[in-house]
Image (tube, helix red, strand yellow):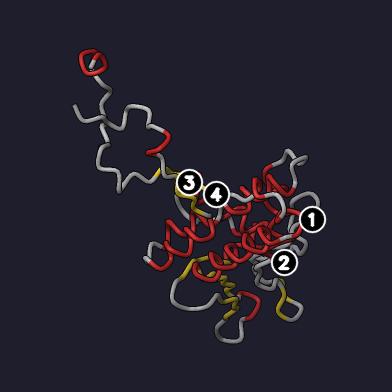
Amino acid sequence: MMPTGNRRLASQMMNPMEISLADEVRKTLQAECYGAALALALTIPDAYGQIAFPEEKKVGKRYMDWYRQYCGYALSSRMGKDPMPAFDALACYKLRCELLHNGDANMETKYLYELDDQGKLMRNDVNLEHVSFSLRIGLSSKLGKTWEHDDEENAEYSLVVSVEELCLALCDAADRFDRNTETQCRPELRLRIVIDDLRNVTAYRWRSKPLSADEVAE
């Protein structure tokens, strides 16, 4: 009888394939699977933050600290004296939460502005109903403010983030961390997804159902 994937592989048959998060994101972008690429890219600060700040127990703080130190992809929060929507460590973490937990990118617009220690807007004259956030592919990120008929007080604020730019910024940050002298000499810290590659092993096939008692006896 042909052995199945339910049985333990002999050591000589194992062919582990190591996949880096950054490389997988880049391949997914090339395949134009933008949602999958973004979802995976947004986990990079989670994974690397555990290594960089092992003593920090708060996931959000660990995530944002790593983002600020190694990535820092951001859009400015100021245009003249007016507060503008911003994409920074907080916005990236909230996007990660929305996408991975809720399956969408409908962030609360308050997270697109600088907050004080109490979580309130630094400026109180921002009408959050006039703020929009969206993702795009094919063009660069954009930060803008528009109004009509000289009515600047009721201007519309928009923050558009390029999926490609954000994903590649996170990938580059992961690469920089891997090259960091503090971790370079410790290969066990390099994050890799390890998968046994059996595509060229003809003696084994995948079996979704468990073996019967008779099959086990054989």
Q: Nearer the viewer, residue 213 or 86?
A: 213
Give the residue at x 62% y 62%. Answer: 175
The picture places residue 153, in percent across and down from the top left corner, at 65, 76
Residue 120 lies in quadrant: bottom right
The label number, if any, that marks residue 116 in the structure image: 1
The picture places residue 67, in percent across and down from the top left corner, at 68, 58
The picture places residue 53, in percent across and down from the top left corner, at 75, 46
Q: Say what secondary structure mark 4 lies in.
A: loop
Give the residue at x 72% y 66%. Answer: 125
Which of disc 4 and disc 2 is earlier in sequence?
Answer: 2
Q: Say what secondary structure mark 1 lies in.
A: loop
Q: How far is disc 2 from disc 4 in space, using C-alphas? A: 46 Å
Q: Which residue is mark 3?
A: 102
Which of disc 1 and disc 2 is earlier in sequence?
Answer: 1
Give the residue at x 70% y 49%. Answer: 186
Q: Nearer the viewer, residue 133 or 5?
A: 5
User: Which amino acid is tagged 1?
Assistant: Asp
Q: Residues within 10 Å of mark 1 (few under 14, many from 20)?
A: few
Q: Nearer the viewer, residue 42 or 88?
A: 42
* Cβ atoms at labels 1 and 3 below 8 Å apart: no
The label number, if any, that marks residue 192 in the structure image: 4
Q: Which residue is mark 2?
A: 125
Which of disc 4 and disc 1 is earlier in sequence?
Answer: 1
Which of disc 3 and disc 1 is earlier in sequence?
Answer: 3
Q: How far is disc 3 from disc 2 in space, using C-alphas? A: 30 Å
User: Which amino acid is tagged 3?
Assistant: Asn
Q: Say what secondary structure mark 3 lies in.
A: helix
Dividing the image into 4 quarters, which one contains the C terminus?
top left
